[in-house]
Amino acid sequence: MAVSSVTKVRTQVARVVWLLFALAALFLAVGALLVALDANAGNSLVKFVIDTADRVDLGVFSRQDGIKHFTGQDATTKNALFNWGLGAVAWLVVGRIVERVIRP
């Protein structure tokens, strides 16, 4: 009986962890899309998404100092799409691995 309850708890924790990782990836992907579409930075929703994406990029996938830094025409868009896109994929991969470790 105790094993069943532990299994249920681990399953629920794994779901929550996966949801958090997927949300981080979603913010990065939507943030990159908003930068690429040149969305109105004065809009509070756009600002919230981009600020949150800046937080979850962990500095490794930053638009300003990420893995790849583009220069020249449309560099801001290229940096956002490449670095935040790669960051979104990384969040999903690591999230799935962590979820599988937690899940019984």
Image (cartoon, rainbow, N blue to C red):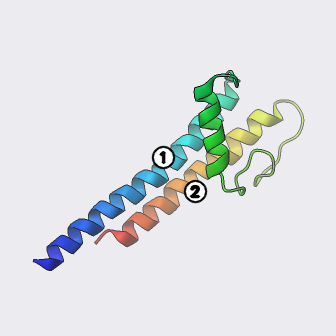
The front one of 20 and 94 is 20
Q: In the drawing, does residue 72 fall left or right of residue 22?
A: right
N-terminal label among 1 and 2: 1
Q: Position of residue 64 (x, y in %)?
A: 80, 46
Name the image quarter holding residue 5: bottom left
Which amino acid type is shown beneath numbered disc 1? Leu
Describe the element under mark 1 as helix, strand or loop: helix
Q: Are marks 1 and 2 in contact (CB under 8 Å)?
A: no
The residue lying at 68 percent from left, 21 percent from top is 40
Residue lying at the far right of the rendered structure: 72
Q: Which residue is mark 1?
A: 23
Name the image quarter holding residue 52: top right
Rendered position, 24 above or below 99: above
Q: Position of residue 79 (x, y in %)?
A: 76, 41
Q: Which residue is mark 2?
A: 90
Q: Position of residue 74 (x, y in %)?
A: 81, 30
Rendered position, 6 above or below 44: below
Rendered position, 89 above or below 94: above
Which amino acid type is shown beneath numbered disc 2? Ala
